[in-house]
Image: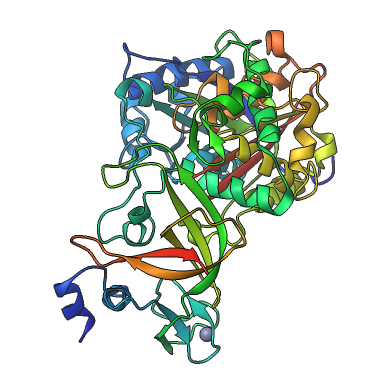
């Protein structure tokens, strides 16, 4: 499926569509450079480390460490009812990813694994739980 | 004083717009009033202005403001570095004026965010933007949720406490009590801050800046032109700017801000060290913003900001007077505070800060921070 078709069917932009397509199957994709092995996220048209065009999507382990977190106590939009926690997870592969928390309140430094929260009209979003 | 510029640059006039809740003016008329007052101080009129530097005044901001004031500039700048834009504008104006590309630079700003009730914590971004896809979708309040994550990381990594952050809000309030123009004057204790409503852990309501109307104007010019100023002109010794990220996930290290680079550039150009600074006017959007600026500018080592602010070091009577007008936390925060930091720094160096004057102040630093701790601009000013 080309990117254009993916966008047609769903969500994202010309570069991010494969990420969201995989998210529908509960797979976490990152870009990896074939030349220098660097991982990057969000997607760019080439590797930011060595500028090689040879970047491709690979499935990540879905494991990481909580790098920071905050629990939100105010209503900022109708979509979210406080309190809820947002974590910034440093993935095993290096890039950091925001996510929600499936249960409890992981502390910074805790090992976490990814799962996915379904959304009504968009692809699912990463949610993390203590490993 | 180390490295000196070939052509010294001065701030020859400063002014605040009406502050607080402004019902009888527009943003443009507020800017016009402040511009006239700053030009009066500089011994100039609108006819002298040939450079204009504006942020947050709508699309093509410098174009809108210049038309309103009847100015056709030969140097124009609407760079958006968030709240730090105004320190960056001093940097840009310094370069433009010293290169002869303009001679009288007007930097100005006004907002009526309080009266308009336009402040929202809703995450930014359209549906297909990177920001909406990878950040807005998580309901992280903007900007406080981002600063909260930065504070949480700093606490984890260095043992910084909520009490230490509260010290900063208390210091700002004590200064505000000496400034009749300050929005909040009632006493504030560390306990009060800790007991105020939790917004986004670990930041409480009283760790957050005000939401008020306000703004200001400043005039940057040559030594020659500054000689006619009605009030003492203040020399720009150095300036610097930088930014690190747009999305919080892309900030290289949550405990290090762009201030490390903007500060190094500004202090290096000025040929000063933190020990030379008599007055610090840091951007206090949140208490953590000040704490990390102290480290990034070199007032203390990385990780020691918490211990540094203990015991009222930034408060009246402390060894590093900071936020001397009461800061964004207690004096005024019109959405972008950067311009008002420069106004206060200049007044301290003119020795006209009345009840809050730092005795014999000779060097002041204004340090702007914008975005989600994304941008920094640092300006070193001196009385000569
Ligand atoms: Zn590479």
Image mark count: 0
Q: What quarter of the picture does the N terminus of chain A occupy?
A: bottom left
Residue shown at 51% from the left, 53% from the top: A105
Against A108, residue B3 (above or below) is: above
Left or right of B270 on screen, residue A73: left
Q: Nearer the viewer, residue A80 or A94?
A: A80
Q: Quadrant of residue A21?
A: bottom left
Residue B368 location, x and y as percent?
Answer: 58, 39
Q: Position of residue A42 (x, y in %)?
A: 41, 70
- Residue at the outermost front position: A104
By what rule are the colours in the image chosen?
rainbow
Q: What residue is drawn where x is 60% and y is 21%? A: B192
Residue positioned 34% across, 19% down in the render: B29
> Which of these two is toward me, B308 or B34?
B308
What is the x, y in percent for residue B244? 55, 57
Q: Is residue B148 left or right of residue B20?
A: right
Decide if residue A33 is in sight here.
yes
Pick whichever, A101 or B233, lies toward us: A101
Q: Position of residue A49 (x, y in %)?
A: 55, 79
Question: What residue lies at 58% left-to-right and 7% top-to-bottom?
Answer: B180
Decide: is B342 above or below B296.
above
Q: Quick check: can you spot residue B257?
A: no
Q: Is residue B375 above or below residue B286?
A: below
């Amino acid at each position: 499926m080309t990117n254009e078709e993916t966008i047609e069917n769903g969500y994202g932009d010309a570069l991010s569509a494969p990420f969201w397509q995989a998210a529908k199957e509960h797979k976490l994709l990152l870009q990896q450079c074939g030349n220098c092995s660097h991982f990057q996220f969000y997607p760019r048209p080439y590797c930011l480390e060595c500028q090689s065009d040879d970047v491709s999507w690979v499935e990540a382990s879905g494991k990481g460490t909580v790098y920071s977190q905050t629990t939100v106590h105010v209503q900022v939009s109708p979509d979210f009812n406080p309190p809820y926690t947002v974590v910034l997870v440093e993935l095993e592969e290096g890039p950091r990813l925001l996510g929600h928390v499936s249960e409890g309140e992981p502390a910074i430094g805790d090992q976490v694994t990814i799962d996915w929260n379904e959304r009504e009209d968009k692809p699912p979003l990463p949610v993390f739980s203590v490993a | 004083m180390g490295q000196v510029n070939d052509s010294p640059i001065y701030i020859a006039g400063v002014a605040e717009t009406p502050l607080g809740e402004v019902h009888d003016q527009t943003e443009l008329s507020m800017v016009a009033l402040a511009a006239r007052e700053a030009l009066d101080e500089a011994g100039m009129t609108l006819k002298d202005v040939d450079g204009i530097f504006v942020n947050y005044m709508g699309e093509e901001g410098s174009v809108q403001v210049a038309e309103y004031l009847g100015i056709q500039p030969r140097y124009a700048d609407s760079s958006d570095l968030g709240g730090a834009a105004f320190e960056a504008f001093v940097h840009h104006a310094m370069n433009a004026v010293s290169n002869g590309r303009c001679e009288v630079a007007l930097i100005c700003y006004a907002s009526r965010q309080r009266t308009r009730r336009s402040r929202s914590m809703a995450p930014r971004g359209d549906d297909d933007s990177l920001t909406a896809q990878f950040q807005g979708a998580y309901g992280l309040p903007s900007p406080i949720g981002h600063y909260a994550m930065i504070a949480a990381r700093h606490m984890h990594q260095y043992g910084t406490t909520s009490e230490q952050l509260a010290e900063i809000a208390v210091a700002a309030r004590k200064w505000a009590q000496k400034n009749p123009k300050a929005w909040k004057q009632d006493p504030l204790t560390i306990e009060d801050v800790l007991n105020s409503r939790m917004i986004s852990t670990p930041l409480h309501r009283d760790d957050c800046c005000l939401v008020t109307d306000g703004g200001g104007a400043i005039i940057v010019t040559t030594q020659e032109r500054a000689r006619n100023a009605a009030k003492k002109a203040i020399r720009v010794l150095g300036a610097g700017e930088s930014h690190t990220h747009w999305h919080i996930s892309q900030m290289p290290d949550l405990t290090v801000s762009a201030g490390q680079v903007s500060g190094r550039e500004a202090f290096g150009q000025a040929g000063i060290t933190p020990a030379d600074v008599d007055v610090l006017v840091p951007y206090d959007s949140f208490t953590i913003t000040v704490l990390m600026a102290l480290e990034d500018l070199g007032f203390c080592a990385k990780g020691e900001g918490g211990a540094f602010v203990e015991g009222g070091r930034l408060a009246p009577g402390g060894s590093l007077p900071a936020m001397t007008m009461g800061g964004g936390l207690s004096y005024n925060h019109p959405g972008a505070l950067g311009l008002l930091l420069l106004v206060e720094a200049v007044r301290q160096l003119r020795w006209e800060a009345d009840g809050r004057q730092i005795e014999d102040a000779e060097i002041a630093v204004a340090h702007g921070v914008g975005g989600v701790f994304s941008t920094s601009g640092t300006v070193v000013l001196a009385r000569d």
